[in-house]
Image (cartoon, grey):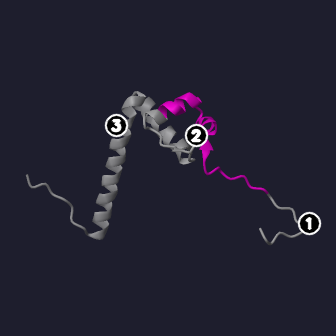
Amino acid sequence: MEHLLPGTVYAIIPTRPRRMDLDAFADAAGIHPELARRLVRLGLLDPVRDASGRLWFAPAHVAAYARLERLRTGLCLNYAALGLVVELLDRIAELERDLRTRHHTGGRTWTPTA
């Protein structure tokens, strides 16, 4: 900010935080902090822990939680089963991306021989 002009009014534009503590994440996701802790224990969310053990969530974790909640309510799954479902869906998406990339680059696809 080396070019500030005296007497000029500057607008302060709020930005999304780069990381949120447990309470801020729970508030943004609309859940209780204990549920957020449970999702971390189950491996469904992977926040960063600082040296003191405090959890720090990225803004993308809010969208990840929304996905978990849609799957849980839409498929009537419990939180323990969500881990497997999310892993499978992510793997399918990865395979589909690889297939599209191979198709566009002219690469050969794998064909089982047995």
Q: CA distance from mark 1 to mark 2?
A: 42 Å
Q: Position of residue 91 (x, y in %)?
A: 33, 48
Q: Amino acid at mark 2?
A: Arg
Image coordinates of residue 79 in percent, x first then y, are: 42, 30
Residue at 35% x, 37% y: name it. Answer: 85
Q: Which residue is mark 2?
A: 54
Residue 5 located left or right of residue 12:
right
Residue 24 sits inside the magenta stretch: yes
- Dot 2 crowding, Cα within 10 Å, few <14, some 14–19, many 20+: few
Q: Secondary structure at mark 1?
A: loop
Query: For this rendering, which residue is in front, 3 or 92?
Result: 3
Point out the residue furthest to the front here: 51
Q: Secondary structure at mark 3?
A: helix
Give the percent coordinates (x, y) of residue 104: 31, 67
Residue at 28 percent of width and 64 percent of height: 102
State the residue lying farthest toward the right. 7
Classify 10 Å Cα crowding around label 3: few (below 14), some (14-19), many (20 and above). Answer: few
Q: CA distance from mark 3 to mark 1?
A: 59 Å
Q: Which residue is mark 3?
A: 84
Residue range corresponding to the magenta coloring: 12-39
- In this view of the protein, which residue sits in the foreground, 54 or 100? 54
Q: Residue furthest bottom?
A: 3
Q: Quadrant of residue 96?
A: bottom left
Q: Residue at x 36, y 31 (%)?
A: 81
Q: Which mark is residue 7?
A: 1
First reached walking from the N terminus: tag 3 or tag 1: 1
Looking at numbered disc 1 in the image, what kind of residue is underneath it?
Gly
